[in-house]
Image (tube, rainbow, N blue to C red):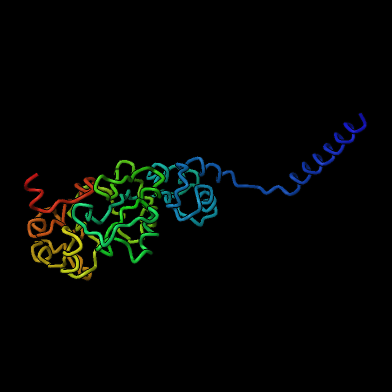
Amino acid sequence: MFAVLALGGIGAFFGLLLGLAARFFAVDTDPRIEAVREALPGANCGACAYAGCNKYAEAVVAGDALVNGCIPGGDMTASAIAAIMGQKAGTVEPKVAYVFCRGDHRHARDLFIYHGILDCDYAQQYHGGFKACPDGCLGLGNCVRACPFEALSMGPEGLPQVDEDRCSGCGLCVEACPREIIRLLPKGDHGHLVWCNSQQRGKTVSRACEVGCTGCRACVRACPQEAISMDGYLAVIDLEKCDDCGLCVEKCRFGSIHPRREAAAGSAARPEEAASA
């Protein structure tokens, strides 16, 4: 009985101490932080440049972050947070990830058979990767694993495919790609794009990949809107200038250019293959 009473007394004493400590050392929190946190989708993806939704909510209330900084949440979340903060939300431009490589198993050449860890970063460190194209997709799925929204999957020919309906434009796949092949573009299906990431010279590209851009400039000369320019040895199309006329597609001998709305296909066929399909 004595032992029970002693333990009970000790427990009550320390409980009282903890209660007093909680009362005197309590940190007042702004109720708006919890309100902002509740308005967020809770993905903790880091697209806002903060370590999760909690940190972003704290930054918004502190005035260190914009109310429309949650890319996955879009306009609806921005409007809700703006109402909590008494601000104007502005607009959140929806973006989608695109994989700028069509060098799949059928069209791109490998230098050797890779038996290492199925990770693009590790493969990149092993003699610069097993792909003959040093700028092409390694196809080991770092971007797929990085996506918290399950918007990316590996296609049957070894290239990642993007589900535009699920993609939030958070950019985590962009950060996960060691070869900087994935880029975020405004959501939509307007415009043509050069589905290549190579910065190599023409002969080097053609030896490594059948559908790579060789920098021949035929598309540049063919474009009536002057929407195509050269970034080194790679042709780049300005979506704001492109009017979808398709003349660049006709002039590209290697099938590097395709309409953006075909991006979900995940791989490109050469012109003669597309004609026979």
Residue at figure coordinates x 37%, y 44% from the top left: 75
Q: Position of residue 236 (x, y in %)?
A: 20, 63
Residue at figure coordinates x 47%, y 41% from the top left: 39
Question: Front-most of 172 and 49?
Answer: 172
Question: Front-most of 176 and 65?
Answer: 176
In which quadrant will I find the N terminus? top right
The image shows residue 145, relative to residue 228, as above or below, that is: above
The image shows residue 212, relative to residue 93, as above or below, that is: below
Q: Is residue 236 left or right of residue 1?
A: left
For the view shown, which residue lies furthest in the top direction?
A: 1
Q: Is residue 216 left or right of residue 139?
A: left
In which quadrant will I find the C terminus? top left
Question: Front-most of 213 and 52?
Answer: 213
Q: Exactly how many numbered labels are in the figure?
A: 0
Q: Position of residue 180 (x, y in %)?
A: 33, 60
User: Where on the picture, by quarter, is residue 151?
Assistant: top left
Q: Position of residue 121 (x, y in %)?
A: 39, 59
User: Where on the picture, by quarter, is residue 216?
Assistant: bottom left
Q: Position of residue 234 (x, y in %)?
A: 20, 66
